[in-house]
Image (spheres, rainbow, N blue to C red):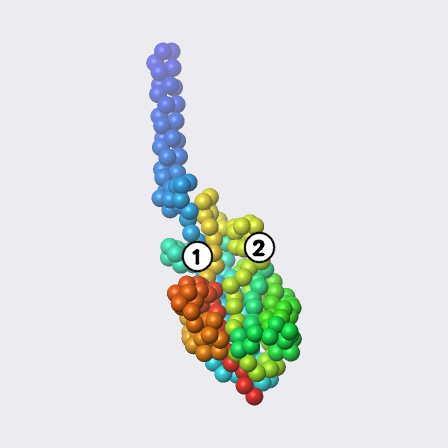
Amino acid sequence: MAKSTHNFIFSRNYIFTWCLLGMTLSLSCEDKKCGGNNSRYQYLLEVKATITPAKELYHLGDTVAFSLYLPRTIIDRNHDELETIANHSLVHLSFATRVDTLEDDVLMDQFLNLVGPDIGNARFEPVGNSVAVTADFTENNLGDWELQYRFVLKRTGVYFFRLNYFIGGERRAGNLQLLNECGNGIIELFHNLNDGANNNWHLLCASNEQYCTPAWDETVRDRTFDQHAGFVFKVVE
């Protein structure tokens, strides 16, 4: 009886030790990736954006298509790893701003005419010399999300199209969750516009000197164009 009790205690301690070791290894793996509670794990998830046709010079009456593709299995550019989106409620917000004039009383509904949307829902609101385009994603048959709309160019000028907004932010309002997400994670989205094609930055500087300052060159340009996919174009007759 004593031997049986001893074996029971030994087995129980053995199992407990292995369970504790397994938990330790699991936590160690998570700490190895996430960096522990005293740090912030920075996700930079790549969203595919497309402007078609992507040109420097357009003419009055031309139609331009914009699309955004949010894959469920998405690359984290900061760590070169694939992550999986569990769910999201993102609403995309982009701005088109006329930069060769500072007249705020010129309404953008005289410049752009929204067509569609072709995929998802889109709506626009003139705001001074800008127009805000709000768009909702639609889930496709593959379980990914996408949106697409077109706009017609109605007036000459130089325009700055910015894709750097998601209503509520990517993570602050809990709008996007990943499977096995780090508890200390911070999520940002990277707009990969036309696979890194030319974004016509030189037009911005040539059209308005406020975009030629060192601060714009060193900070705003990198973040706005590399991460948030700014695109500049000119409309002529």
Vertical placement of 137 versus 177: above or below?
below
Q: Amino acid at mark 1?
A: Leu
Left or right: 99 in relation to 105: left
Residue located at (61% from left, 81% from top): 154
Say whether residue 88 is visible: no
Q: Which residue is mark 2?
A: 168
The reply to whether callout 2 and callout 1 are in contact (CB within 8 Å) is no
Left or right: 10 in relation to 126: left
Residue located at (43% from left, 59% from top): 75
Provide the secondary structure element on which disc 2 rests.
loop
Q: Amino acid at mark 2?
A: Gly
Residue 131 image position (x, y, % from top left): 61, 70
**Mark earlier in primary sequence (2, 1):** 1
Residue 232 image position (x, y, % from top left): 49, 75
Q: Which residue is mark 1?
A: 44
Q: Which quarter of the image is occupied by the C terminus?
A: bottom right
Provide the secondary structure element on which disc 1 rests.
strand
